[in-house]
Image (cartoon, coloured by chain):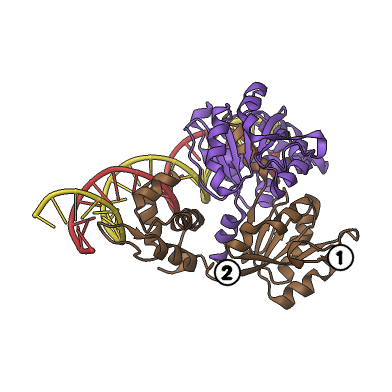
Chain colours: A brown, B purple, C yellow, D red
Amino acid sequence: MSAYEIPDIVVGRLPVYLRALARMAQDGREITSSHELGERLGISSAQIRKDLSHFGEFGKQGTGYQVKFLVGQLQRILKVETEWEMALVGAGDLGHALAHYNGLVNRGFRIVAVFDNDPAKIGARLDGGLVVEDAARMKDLIRRRGVKIGMVAVPADQAQVVSDLLVEAGVRAILNYAPITISVPDEVRVQYIDPVVHLQRMTFYL
Amino acid sequence: MSAYEIPDIVVGRLPVYLRALARMAQDGREITSSHELGERLGISSAQIRKDLSHFGEFGKQGTGYQVKFLVGQLQRILKVETEWEMALVGAGDLGHALAHYNGLVNRGFRIVAVFDNDPAKIGARLDGGLVVEDAARMKDLIRRRGVKIGMVAVPADQAQVVSDLLVEAGVRAILNYAPITISVPDEVRVQYIDPVVHLQRMTFYL
DNA sequence: TAGATTGTTAATCGATTAACAATC
DNA sequence: TAGATTGTTAATCGATTAACAATC
């Protein structure tokens, strides 16, 4: 089955499966089952099997799944076998936290450039030898390096302009931390992280 | 229609509507329509009208919606008219970024306590006068203050233990930044923020 | 063999959309 | 009145689940 038929909602669950399986592997678990994984994730075993079935057959009847093997398959499906280079725009508190966060590079996402338009921040050296670049150089540097993923950590009122520049520079996936919905061409993917949105999804039930 | 019938997926969109409408209000827009809002958010106008219809009638035929009024209604529905107090566990880079982030308190979410179990961090003073407390005091302090929302910004291997403590302390909503699915009682809500999961949802399409 | 678990089918369940009467 | 837009219905579309043959 080819990619264009896979529902977004299925793709959205794969990283969560991968995360749990990678942890199982780390814990030395060699085999698991859709039932066990489902228990752990609060998802039905049928859903897990159905989701995986979009991509092939990865288990054995009566036995279950080899954890390491399934991790490898999910990494391949999600295209995270090798490292992705990312550009980060915004060198405020959040930008610094992201630049220092080992969890990104550990799992295959390396920030290779950081941009800001604040003269007071440009030139500052971050952990790992990154230097904050002038946002004016964004398009050129991103295009030259062929970076395809951007992280937007600027105030809401700059997020659209920044995103437009990223897209012009050739970025095709944007992780947007700014609290605003941005508009991009169809071929560009956007994911949103806004803690307030997540919090408001819970206060409704309190 | 009462709350227990509202689909989660509908509730999940309301904060996004609210965010866009609040911005419109800030920009001085007095009236909008489901069509305009849908355009801005990449959602069909029918879906917006249908979502809102779960909670009442907020618009006028031929005219649309009063932006300020709808903002107020959504705030009421989501229970974000008044400020929520939150506890933050983990005073690392991410914890600091969250504690400094004005976007939280601006939109009604105030961190009133920060905890860590690292002696080197306990006692440190953060912006806004917060002092990092010993995680051992977590349960007592949270319970005494009646805090209902917790943010977990600790390493993955501590997230479950921390969440258990929060739940014991009376927390009923957890925003989990640790890259692991946690297990909580049914009455506790959890939302997840893991940048790697979000990134992997996009790499599939690259 | 007996027990377990997959991959898949078909049925169920739920969400989205199109369309339109009501009405501002 | 004419034009616009809501709230709602019914139809369509899509996702989840239950069940089971296949098989390890």
Location of residue C6 by image quarter? bottom left
Q: In the rendered structure, find residue B206 and report the number of the disc placed on it.
A: 2
Q: Which residue occupies 47% across, 32% down?
A: B186
In percent of width and height, residue B142 lies at 64, 27
Q: Quadrant of the C terminus of chain A?
A: top right
Does residue A145 appear left or right of residue C15 in this picture? right
Q: Is residue A160 visible?
A: yes
Q: Secondary structure at mark 2?
A: loop
Identify which residue, B79 or B61, lies in the foreground.
B79
Compared with residue B15, is residue A72 higher up or lower down, i.e. above or below? below
Marks counted in the figure total: 2
Give whichever of B88, B4 is nearer the camera.
B88
Q: Which mark is residue B178?
A: none
Subunit under mark 1: A
Q: Of helix, strand and loop, which one carries label 1? A: loop
Farthest residue to the top: give it. Answer: B144
Quick one: label 1, few (<14), some, or many (20+) residues within 10 Å? some
What is the x, y in percent for residue B137? Answer: 64, 29
Q: Amino acid at mark 2?
A: Leu
Residue at the spot x=38%, y=46% of the render? A44
Give how far across and how far down residue B175 sits, in percent.
Answer: 61, 40
Q: Amino acid at mark 1?
A: Gly
**Could you say which is closer to the camera, residue D21 or residue B142?**
B142
Residue beneath disc 1? A123
Give the spatial CA distance, label 1 vs label 2.
Answer: 31 Å
